[in-house]
Amino acid sequence: MNNSPVTWNELYVVAGLIIGAGTTVAACTAWLWRLVAAMRKEVADFREKVAETYATTHTVIQVESRIEAALNRMVEQFERGFDRVIGLISANAAAARRRDRPG
């Protein structure tokens, strides 16, 4: 006779259920771990892409501002030169008028 309250068959069933539950938990944990790793990689790639895009946009803005500053300096130099040429032409014209006056 068996005086124990639990039979071997019942222990096998409980052990099987515990092993099955453990395997299921381990499989779910591994799946979630891979999912999190994939998401982290996607986020890292996205951050890298954003950083490259931002850096490129920032660099383009810097280049544009440098070009604008260089063009402004060129315009100022041209205007100063133009004003000098106009001043010389005006002075020469005034001198010529004075020379051509009778008297």
Image (cartoon, rainbow, N blue to C red):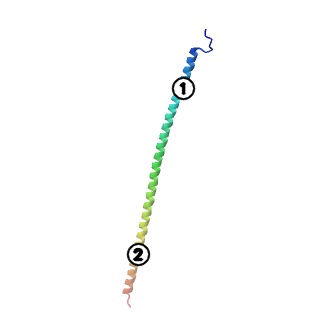
Q: Residue at x 44, y 55 (%)?
A: 60
Type of amino acid at the residue the image marks with label 1: Gly
Percent of width and height locating residue 53: 45, 49
The one nearer the camera, 11 or 62, is 11
Residue beneath disc 2: 84
Residue type beneath disc 2: Arg
Image quadrant where residue 81 sits: bottom left
| Quadrant occupied by the C terminus | bottom left
Is 51 placed above or below 84 here? above
Residue 34 drawn above or below residue 52: above
What residue is drawn where x is 40% and y is 79%?
A: 90
Secondary element at image label 2? helix
Label 2 and label 1: CA atoms lie apart by 91 Å
**Residue beneath label 1, please?**
22
Which quarter of the rendering shows the N terminus?
top right
Give the image location of residue 94, x and y in percent: 40, 82
Residues packed near mark 2 inside 10 Å, few (<14), some (14 to 19) or many (20 plus): few
User: Which of the labelled discs sits on residue 8, or is there none?
Assistant: none
Q: Is residue 3 above or below residue 84?
A: above
Please provide percent x and percent y for residue 69. Answer: 44, 63
- The residue positioned 54% from the left and 28% from the top of the image is 25
In the displayed structure, 54 sits above or below 3; it is below
